[in-house]
């Protein structure tokens, strides 16, 4: 089943957020030697991460990112680990299924989803989501 892993990446500084955005984009430097020394650790954390299908700036510290993934915990775990290795907080991690259903990820492990790791976020009567903008609105809405 096709799915996508989406999350918000919040960096500690605007400069760090700009570096995360650069290193997830097609403009990523091709070699570590092309990166300023203070950003090499961040570069290495994202060096082998594929370019996301969604990369959108939310504010000076926050990016929304989304990658197509198989409905499997291993690729999600790899992306989650790479993102946290940059110093970012990974917020609102979700799996967005081809059916439009959205599942909140409560735990990220490499070897399979356990009961409770994926929780449907849509309440009875809510529509399924099929557009990035709708998903972002949902990710940014206040709890409650």
Image: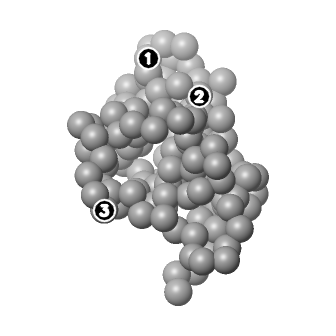
Q: Taking 67 as reference, is 40 left or right?
A: left
Secondary structure beneath dot 2 equals: loop
Q: Residue 116: x percent and y percent?
A: 31, 62
The residue drawn where x is 47% and y is 27% is 49
Q: Residue 113: x percent and y percent?
A: 30, 47
> Which mark lies nearer to you, 1 or 2?
2
Between 15 and 104, which is closer to the camera in this rendering? 104
Disc on the earlier residue, 3 or 2: 2
Q: Quadrant of residue 2?
A: top right
- Is there a contact, CB below 8 Å, between mark 1 and mark 3? no
User: Whole-Å distance between the Cαs marked 1 and 3?
Assistant: 39 Å
Secondary structure beneath dot 1 equals: helix
Task: Name the residue carrying label 2.
Answer: 51
Q: Is residue 14 above or below residue 65?
A: below
> Which mark lies nearer to you, 3 or 2?
3
Disc on the earlier residue, 1 or 3: 1
Q: Residues within 10 Å of mark 2 (few under 14, many from 20)?
A: some
The residue drawn where x is 26% and y is 44% is 109
Q: Residue 101: x percent and y percent?
A: 59, 56
Between 80 and 117, which is closer to the camera in this rendering? 117
Task: Name the residue carrying label 1.
Answer: 32
User: Whole-Å distance between the Cαs marked 1 and 2?
Assistant: 17 Å
Q: Residue 15: x percent and y percent?
A: 54, 48
Task: Name the residue carrying label 3.
Answer: 116
């Amino acid at each position: 089943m096709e799915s996508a892993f989406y999350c918000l990446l919040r960096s500690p500084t605007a400069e760090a957020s700009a570096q995360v955005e650069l290193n997830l984009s097609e403009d990523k430097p091709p070699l570590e030697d092309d990166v300023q020394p203070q950003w090499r650790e961040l570069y290495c954390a994202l060096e082998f991460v594929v370019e996301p299908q969604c990369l959108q700036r939310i504010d000076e510290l926050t990016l929304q990112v989304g990658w197509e993934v198989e409905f499997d915990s291993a690729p999600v775990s790899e992306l989650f680990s790479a993102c946290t290795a940059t110093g970012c907080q990974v917020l609102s991690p979700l799996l967005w299924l081809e059916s439009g259903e959205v599942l909140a990820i409560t735990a990220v492990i490499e070897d399979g989803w356990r009961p409770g790791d994926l929780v449907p976020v849509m309440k009875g009567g809510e529509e399924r989501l099929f557009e990035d903008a709708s998903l972002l609105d949902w990710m940014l809405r206040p709890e409650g």
